Each structure stands twice: as structure tokens, then as C-alpha cells.
Amino acid sequence: MAGTLAITTKESIIVSKKFDALFDKMQSKLRGDDESNLIKAFELARDAHGNQRRKSGEPYILHPIEVARICTEEIGLGPTAVIAALLHDVVEDTGISQEDILIQFGPKISKIVDGLTKIDGLYNVGSPQAQNLKKVLSTLVEDVRVILIKMADRLHNLRTIDSMPKHKQLRIAAETAYIYAPLAHRLGLYNVKTEYEDIILKINEPENYEYVVSKIKDTDEARQLYIKDFFEPLNKKLEMLARETNHRYLLDGNAKDRQPFRYRTQGRVKAISSINNKLKKKNIPFEKVYDLFAIRIIADVPKEDEKRICWQIYSLVTDVYKPIPERLKDWVTSPKSNGYESLHTTVIGPDGNYVEIQIRSERMNEISERGFAAHWKYKGIKDENSVYDRWLNNIREILDEQHTDAIEFINDFKTNLFSEEVYVFTPKGDMKVLPKGATALDFAFDIHSDIGYKTTALKVNDRIVPMGFKLSNGDRVEVVTNNNQTPSEAWLKMVVTGKARSKIRASMKEERRKQGELGKEALDRKLRRVKADFELNIDELVKYYGFNSRPDLYFAIAEDNIKINLKDFEIDGKKLIIPKKDPTQPSEKKGASESKPAVNDGRKKTNILIDGEPIDTYEFELATCCNPVQGDSIFGFLTTGNGLKVHRISCRNASNLLGKYGYRVLNARWTHLSNNEFVVKLKVTGIDSGIGVIQNLINEISNKLKVNIRSFNISGDEGYFESNINVVVKNKDQLSVVMSTINKLEGVDDVQRVEN
């Protein structure tokens, strides 16, 4: 919050209108005490937030009203969640207590608000993101509405993020990319996920974002005409199918019990971030992206007719347009792990362009748009919620495991945010769903933890395979066990699922604990022999020998990794006299969070400010993974032992660093132009005419642009060449000139800046 300033009469009117609009949208859903609770929640939040304002300067109360609106209108949640959304900040930011919420609104709403308050409380104390995210994710298994409201809160914060300082925008964007966007995908919130990713792109790569937006706008008219032409021959066939289906209902005598079969069509441009990813991945210009949009055909039919109608529509489409068989995806028969159901195919449309078609029912469409929340509307339908039940059970198991730190937990959890899966079978034919990339050993642990622990061999399709063998759809897996088998550290490299990793680690910790007990007993005996007290001396010995904890010392003794000779110590009563420093041990290094890195030796002067201070006060390096140059958007990252690293915001490691270790991230910016030079690697591809390619490239870069070439290599085959060139530039503007000039050369198809 930005502070307080008396709310004006005009602002009060705006607040009232916003709530009235929310109330009108909710009215048809209100039952029992919902109406009075909704009004009471608004009045309590309005009075509690009083004159508080957001960073943008607007009254703070507008934020919970908008979060509540997103919950009902965009995610599809009901009155209980909307009431909790209105109250989600009052306990943390005002004088209202959790007990007040319980008394006024009852246990159900109180529990949700409490979950949201605990999450926000963690974010406000500046603790490491991983610990915060663990708390966020822990709420999933208590009441999913907590996380859904939190996601609505995050969405509104992103929509209004322009008023935040740039370094905070970067941290929030990275955190969203690392957990919230995958979670939105996993819960089926397609629209929320898409908007998350689009805003992340706008924050991290504003130039790319604006480029794609402008191109979409410029091509809109032509695209709409194309979609109209595409549907023209299809509409007649779809109308005929509707008449035939409705006629069949009449013949069956069920017409009175059924709505007439209707259909509608849509042509949607794909997400800005999705198009940008395609441009990067394929190294192509916008004009060469042919599948910019997807066409949907949505049928309004009863659930029992959905599959038949979807395949009939598919047949009509492929009668008109030639399909590409390998692009057929049947998520009607086997829904995705996030509940998504649809029939996808790609056809060759007018002018030879590839067109993606999505065929689904209205029920499927609502679930694809609103995900988990939409399932509650259909929860009376058998097995409708099983995809989520199975996933939530996996999360419960991960939460039940003891993780040494929150990072370990987050890594396990993210493995379960898989977007694709494989379907494999037991010898008896029972189907198991695992993330894509899962191994035979993952399968064993998925059956049962005890089976996983005792696995000695695995058979896939009646053939013995290594434990780390990656499974494919349709594989039949058999597990061979032995009661004497126990997991080893090597097993961690053979599994990918969070469940398997956490179970293996738990087993290893137990084995380590048992070994440690033997080491503890041995140390206790040694101390008793010299009449020294165990508890008086143990912590000093841990510190003296450089271990982090007592169990680590015990285990080292048991494994014979350390020799403790108490004759080397003097004894005062029952206490050992510990020397101040063990000359055989290296001196301890302070972590990055404990102190600033050592002062730079002066050989790496550059014009960067870190949190407003010259970077030369740090021991620093420009990150070699992304090679930032003057003018790139950058951030500073404090490592644990190698000083400060400066990364580009678009670095492939940025999301991981900012998402996991945001507390080590520092705001960085270039100050002014300088004479510093930076090495950038470029990849150039094109048509190999066999004559003059090398000469043209060198002539343009070295002779005409006067840019130094640090290294150059080129290879060509079958009319294609690829060249890697390291050039020395002063700033991003000069780099852009170099890339633009190379791109205009005859025969050059593409030039890209390459990360190491």
C-alpha cells in the first residue's frame, strides 16, 4: 500500500458502483445468508481499509472488490469465495482480527480468510520465496478456494503492476512464471494462465511484447476474412448435422427432454506469449507463423452425446479440408490431467495454410476456460472430478514428507505440475497416469511406496529394462521386488516424480539416521572415557569440525569420514577446551545473505548501479550464460560464494533465480554510455551459394561497420549454411545495427543472439 489519504466523495461513489455491479452479478447465485454476508463483508472491508490507498493512488477497497469480481466472473467461484475475497486483506492490513471474522461470518469463510492471511503474511515479512510458496501450495489440500482466490489476487496485481518499481515487477513476474502460471495450467484455468504469461512477457521483454501486439493488430482484418472463408463451406454441413440430430431426438421420443442441438464457431488469436515463444523457438519472423489462431466448433449437446457429436463434426471438417493425421489429439476419450477435454486436429485450409481446429461441447468449453472451479458445476457427473482427486492425493503425499528445505519441496511439487502425461498399465490391466518423462522406477513408487522401496528389477512389455527406463503410452510394466532391497542415492537420478523422490529421500534419511545413531554411541563412549559430559561438548565439537548439525557429525563418524581423538583436547572438569581455530580446516565463507561480497579489485570497472550504488563496490561478473551488454534489461544476483552476477532479464536462468531466490536479487541498471566492450555470440543461417558467404559476412561486420570479430566459424551442407560469430560491441544499439545489417545480406535467412 502507498499510504493514506482521505477518500473523496467522487471516489466513494465509484466504490459503491463497483460493489453494486458485483452484487448484481452475484444475485442469481445467492442462497440463505449469502446476501446479508456479502453486504456485510463489503461494508466491513470498506470501513476497515478506510483511507488506505494502493501504489497507484486509488482507494485500496477497489482491490478486494475487483478480486471478488474476478473470482465469480472469470474463475466461476460462488458466494462463499466471493465473500472471502472481499475480506482477504482485512486481517493482515487492518485492525480486524481473525476472531472477528469467525464471529461475524462463521467457520467456513473464516477458514478461507485465515488461509489467505497466512499466505499474505509470509509475503510481507520478506522471507525466502520458496518458503512462501510452500505455504501457498499447502493450502491446496485444505480448501482449493484459497489458492483460487490467491490466483485472482495475483491476476489483479499483475493487471495493475505498472505503478510498481521495475525490480519489484521483475520479482513478481518471475514468481508468477515459476509457480502461479504452471499452477493455473494444472487447475485448468486457461485464460488466467494466458494472461499471466502475457503480462510476464510485457514486463520481461517489452519490445517483443509490443512487436507481437502490433503485428496481430496489423493482420487482424485479413485474419477475420480468412476465418469467414474457412467456415463458409463448413456451415452448411454443420447445419445439416444439427437438423439430422434434432430429427433423431424426435424419432427417439426424447425431444421434450432435450434441448435442440445447437453449435457455434469461434476464431481466436493465440496468446501473445505463445506466439513469441514460437518466434524464438523456430527462429522465424512473424509473417512465417501460419498457425496464429485456432478455430473452435462448440456443440451444445447432452453429455451422453458429446463424444459421438465431436467425432461427427471431425468427420465433416475432414470431408472439406485435408487433415494432417499426426496432429490429431483425442482428449475427448482420454482427458488431460487438468481435466481438459477436446478433440484437436490440424487441416490444410484455404491458400494452403495450416489451421488448428478444436472441437468440443459447451460443457468441455466451460471447463477449458474455468478449469477446476467449473468442475463443481458438474460434480454430480460420475468420475468428473477424479483427475483432480488423483493429483491432490499426490500433493498430500508430498506435503506429508519431511523436506530438508523449502526449495526441495518446491522442486518436488513442480514435477507434479506436469502438462503432459503417459498412460501405462499394470500386468492386470489397471491404468496409471504419470508425467511425461516418468521412469519404470517412478511407476513402482506410484503403485505403492513399499513396492518402490523393494524394487530389484522392472519389466516393460515383458522385457527387463533399467530402472531409469522412460515410459511411453501403452507400456505394460511389471515390478520385481525383494524384501532385502533398500533405495540408494543413485535412485534419485532414476526418477522424476515428486512422490518417488520424496520417498527415496525419506528412506535415505532414515538409513542415515540409523547409521548416525551408531556414530553418536561411539562418540558418547569416547567422551565418557575421558569423563567429559556429552551435552556440554557436542555442539562445540560440531562447530569445531565444520559440520552444520549434530546428525551430520554422527553420520561422518559412523562412515569413518572423520577421526576424533579426544587426547588432543584439554579438559576442564567435564568440559573440553576447544582450540579457537583448527589449522587443518579451511576458513568459513559467509553466505551472500550474510554480507556483501568483497570489494572489487578495480580491474572490472563498468557503469552499472546496484540498488543505486556503483557496482564496483561488489566482487562481480557479467553472467556468461546470457552475456549482457550495455542497454540490456538486467538484474543483480548475489551468489553464495562467487560474488554478484549480472544477468539479462531474458536469461533462461532468470525465472528460476528470481522465482526461488528473490531475496538475493538486486535492482540493476546501466548508468550512461561508456567505452566498455562486450562479446556477443551470433548465429547466422541461410542459403549456401558456395561463393562469397564468408567474405560478405566479414566485409559487412569488420570493414563497413568497423566491429571487431573475436571468433568466426561456418559450416555448410546441401545448400544450407550455419555460422557462429563472436562480435565485440559497445552496447545494445550497436548490436542491433550489426544484426540488422547481417539480416539484409543476400542469402541470409536469419540471425539470432545466442546464449551460452
Image: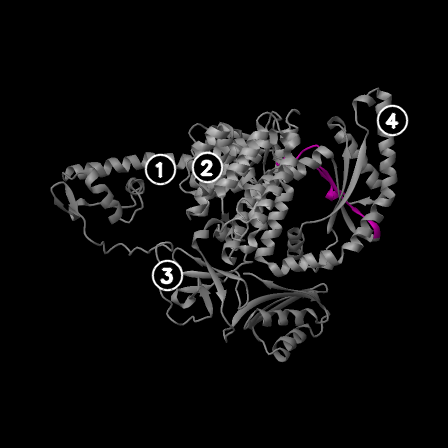
Task: Check whether the beta carbons of the residues at disc 3 and disc 4 lie within 8 A of each other.
Answer: no
Q: Earlier in the sequence, mark 1 or mark 2?
A: 2
Res 77 visible: yes
Which mark is in front, 4 or 1?
4
Residue to which mark 4 is pinned = 247
Viewport quadrant of the C terminus: bottom right
Residue to which mark 2 is pinned = 502
Which mark is in front, 3 or 4?
4
Q: On the image, which quarter does residue 585 sit in? A: bottom left
Q: Secondary structure at mark 3?
A: loop
Query: For the magenta stretch, what is the residue range?
Result: 325-350
Q: Earlier in the sequence, mark 4 or mark 2?
A: 4
> Mark 4: which amino acid?
His
Q: CA distance from mark 4 to mark 1?
A: 71 Å
> Mark 1: which amino acid?
Arg
Q: Earlier in the sequence, mark 3 or mark 4?
A: 4
Residue to which mark 1 is pinned = 512
- The residue at the point 87 percent across, 26 percent down is 247
Does the segment drawn in magenta span residue 329?
yes
> Mark 2: which amino acid?
Ser
Residue to which mark 3 is pinned = 597
In this rendering, the answer to whether 164 lies above or below 559 is: below
Res 89 visible: no
Q: Camera-side residue: 667 or 548?
A: 667
Q: Position of residue 104 (x, y in %)?
A: 48, 30
Q: Earlier in the sequence, mark 1 or mark 3?
A: 1
